[in-house]
Image (tube, helix red, strand yellow):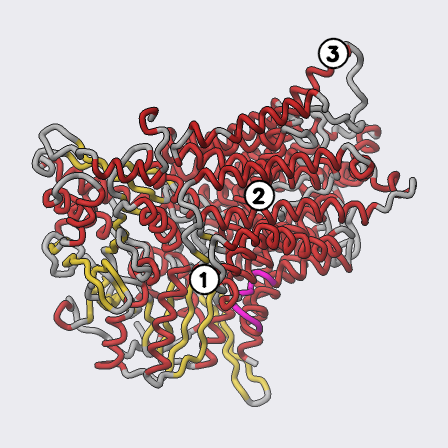
Amino acid sequence: MELLAQVLISGILLGGLYALIGLGMSLIMGVMKIINLAHGELMMVGMYITFWAFTIGKIDPYVSLLIVIPALFVLGAMLQKWLIAPVMEAESILPENQVLLTVGIGLVLSNLALLAFTADYRSVPVSYASKTIYWDVKMAGQTISLSFSFPMLVAFAIALALGGALFLFLGYTDLGRMIRATAQDARAASLMGVNTKRITYITFGLGSALVGAAGALLAPVYYLFPQIGGPFTLKAFIITVLGGLGNVAGAVLGGVVLGLAESLGSVYVSLGYKDAFGFIIFVLVLIFLPKGLLGKGRA
Amino acid sequence: MTNRRMFSVLAVAAFAAFSASPALAQGKTFTVGVPLPLTGAEAKFGEMKKQAYQMAADEINAKGGVKGTKLAFDIQDSGGKPDTASAIVEKFITINKYPIVVGEYTSQCSYAVAGIAEKYKVPYLVDTGAADKITQQGWKYIFRLNSPAGLYAKGVFSFFEEVAKPKSVAILFENTDFGTSTSKSMKEYAESHGMQVVLAEGYQAGAVDFKPILQKVKSLRPDIVYMVSYLMDASLLMRQSKELDLNAQAFIGGAAGHTLPEFLENAGDATEFCMSASLWTPQVKYPGAAAFDANFQKLYKKAPSYHAAEAYSTAFVLADVLARAKSMSSDDLRDALAATDMMTAFGPVKFQAWDKFTNQNRMETLVGQWQKKKFETVWPKALASAPYVYPAPRWRDRK
Amino acid sequence: MSRATLLSLGGLALLAVVPAVVSNPYVLHMLILCLLWTVLGQSWNLLGGYTGQVSFGHAAFFGIGAYTTGILVKTGMSPAAAWWGLLLGGLAAAAASAVIGWICFRLRGPYFALSVLALAEVLRLIALNWKQLTNGAEGILFIPAFNSKSWYYWIVLALAAVSMALIRFVMHGKLGFYFLAIREDQDCAESLGINATKYKLISLLLSAFFTGVAGSFYMNYMGFIDPGIVFSIHDISVMMILVTMLGGVATTWGPAVGAAIYILMSEVFRTYLKSGHLVFFGLLIIVIIIFFPQGIVGTLRETLQRRKRRLAAPPAGGPLKEAA
């Protein structure tokens, strides 16, 4: 019982962080239908900003969100404006050639980080990195002692807050409506006077800012090195598809489902196959729930 | 190339071996080919080994080299990929005509390179790749300076027998060649000595959250938690064990991650009393070990890991081989390597055949323990720099 | 015999005598890799370029092919006899592709791409954890059958020639038109009575077969595989797309050009640019995609066609005729 409860807690907390990683990709894929293979590398950039802010300026990772979010927004918007958009406009047999562009961007980002910051593993040793909150629950005459990692709790809360903010932004602001309109039908949106080109810059910027924020939240509980991105890009794919493209609530749910699949799978089935559960759920959802878990949002 | 055009590869190699090799002389340079991961996930260790080779070459050359010949390392990036490493070594042998190869970091890459070197009859001195099988193939040209992975925990076993006498063990290892071979020996030891193996599972390196599996370990209450992990997995495993209040008589690492300075940086207090098998620590009583540690720190502003000590000592083994070899041909260098019997900062080096191994150096493996943020050698007693603490106090009872 | 065929045969004959002239194993190794990647590019091109089904998981078929041969040798077959593994590896990959296709062809576009990727990852994890069968992370090693690289060169040259010829043949027949129709507009093709699922599956079977053969060849040639090498997303799946797109999708010679760029440029960069080489390789990809959005062969062909006709450019996305 204690084992199950603790595994559920771990899975859900991790899921919050995953959700934030997936949100950015969900937004980008929803609006532009691009598969961004440099997603994890953008997170890596966010983590390095957090790391240097802490190391040089003694800025707490949670405060450094205020630096990471705008910095990544600008980086993402610039990538879209100068590299991706021109390729999207060029005629080509397969639209997937922007995917290769993102492969190139990812290679450049991770190897520039390698040259600039060496391959050393870094961590952000905040005082509360290992702080744990214990909670003893009395159940059926037994005492179950549960532990919550403090930075994971904070990350979960901030991830939900950012998800909520994005939800409100997309639902209730003009700019948000324009983004949704572009996601639904770019041509119709541009006929309605939406500057779809600018919308794509903003969207890519927002997506990058979100994954950068995830990086900042991950920094205290994890570590960073230039090659950290790859596995997180994969996780973002899974979450995006589970949630349905561009669906904020779906992405949060997808993140939590993935976190739970990994934690439950590693304990009750096999640690070696831990990462396989996410992929298997992913394929099953694709086939049986083609609109994602919440059944909407797939253009 | 034109005059040798019609020779097959082997004829060329044989031809090169019999053609007069230049003797050692003033103003000459002897170059050794080194594939290393300088990009990719293992880049950190490739970088560190590169620095150690460079540092050793500079030291040797500052003293006039080997009988006037300078030692140089041609270091190429393999990205940690076995196929790239093989291609590089093939180029070293056939184009650059380097008569000897050292280097690589992962077991997989070392194994692939060894296959190529053996094929071309060029000696390859492995100094980090640890999987047992590398020196179990009966290969004539492959030598290994470091201990095979299966013996990394030898010191830990003798500690079990003489001190700890544990009854049960949980084993977690990274799913790589190194992790598999190192953990296998622990599993076999435990089973043959009446210890209960409550869990033995491999994981994918780089996980964010080990808590679920650690919680499972906690519910199984083993005496020993044995981990074979890479750097950051080691840190997270210890940090999260502490967070979960998972207690054991001892947490023991199978070298690698649990011995490195970054482990301390990243895991902080959670390292206290954590033990680990180790091949080398800066306080070992081998001549030159302490000086190497101090100089490396001065030069590169970071503490060297045992991988760096391996690379550094490899350079001195090469210098010694070069001084003794009849000529600079691969075969003479091989013979000189086989006759090596010397002391290095990494310990004594003598390549022998034993158990199923050939050309394998036999080394003491140590047990270290993190005490007050220092990695002290605690076993065997003869080499100890501090007394061991066993069993480790519970997390909640610590100050 | 058309002029193009004669030219191709002449080129093949020229390539076939290369080992007699170049005895340097390192140079041969680079050529072998170029040809191997040509086969891989051709395979991906058939499904992705011509049929429009972009897969991000072709490492699945490469890995199955490689492991088929590896397991044959592991269970006692001699490496020399393991050449049968080439055929078996291809067949095993094709069999697996039937299953994967049955699952993934319900999906379109990015979902198809990602679902194949997911299954390739699942296969990697199986290869990593099913130790009795695959040796797990240790990988499988044997000393290759031939000492001389010439044999490998001729074998992979034959593979490249056969795969190219067969794909060209297919693309000039009825099948090829069905493939193109499906790529351009699947719904429209179905309304004209083309059974899209069936033809997509045929395309996938062929594509997976050659990828599996290439994987088998890799095992025979390199003598060492592990799950991380042959099921790699980045080093196999993505690079197959890269090779095809850099050269030009849906062109006959694109994959060969792309393979040459990939192998030779990355080798040159690696040798001369030290730790920064991947930055430059990444920049090279970005530059090629921006200035040659159709790949090198594809974009050159377009410019040539434009010049020839002096007419308005062909309508966007119209089925392009095959051209050498």
State the separation of the CA atoms marked 2 and 3.
Answer: 42 Å
State the separation of the CA atoms marked 3 and 1.
Answer: 58 Å
- Tell me if mark 2 has few (under 14), some (14-19) or many (20+) residues whose alpha carbon lies within 10 angstroms of its own: many
Quarter of the C terminus of chain A within the rendering: top right
At 27% from the left edge and 73% from the top edge, which residue is drawn? B156
The amino acid type found where label 1 is placed reads: Asn
Q: Position of residue C300 (x, y in %)?
A: 65, 19
Q: Nearer the viewer, mark 1 or mark 2?
A: 1
Q: A263 above or below C200?
A: below
Residue B31: image quadrant is top left
The residue at the far top in this view is C310
- Tell me if mark 3 has few (under 14), some (14-19) or many (20+) residues whose alpha carbon lies within 10 angstroms of its own: few
Quarter of the N terminus of chain A within the rendering: bottom right
The amino acid type found where label 3 is placed reads: Lys
- Tell me if mark 1 has few (under 14), some (14-19) or many (20+) residues whose alpha carbon lies within 10 angstroms of its own: many
Q: Which residue is mark 3?
A: C308
Confirm whether residue A231 shows in the render.
no
**SS at mark 2?**
helix
User: Mark 1, chain letter?
Assistant: B
Q: Which residue is mark 1?
A: B175
Q: Position of residue C182 (x, y in %)?
A: 81, 39
Mark 2 on the same chain as mark 3: no
Q: Nearer the viewer, mark 2 or mark 3?
A: 3
**SS at mark 1?**
loop
Q: Is residue B61 magenta?
A: no
Given residues A74 and C135, the one toward you in this image is: C135
**SS at mark 3?**
helix
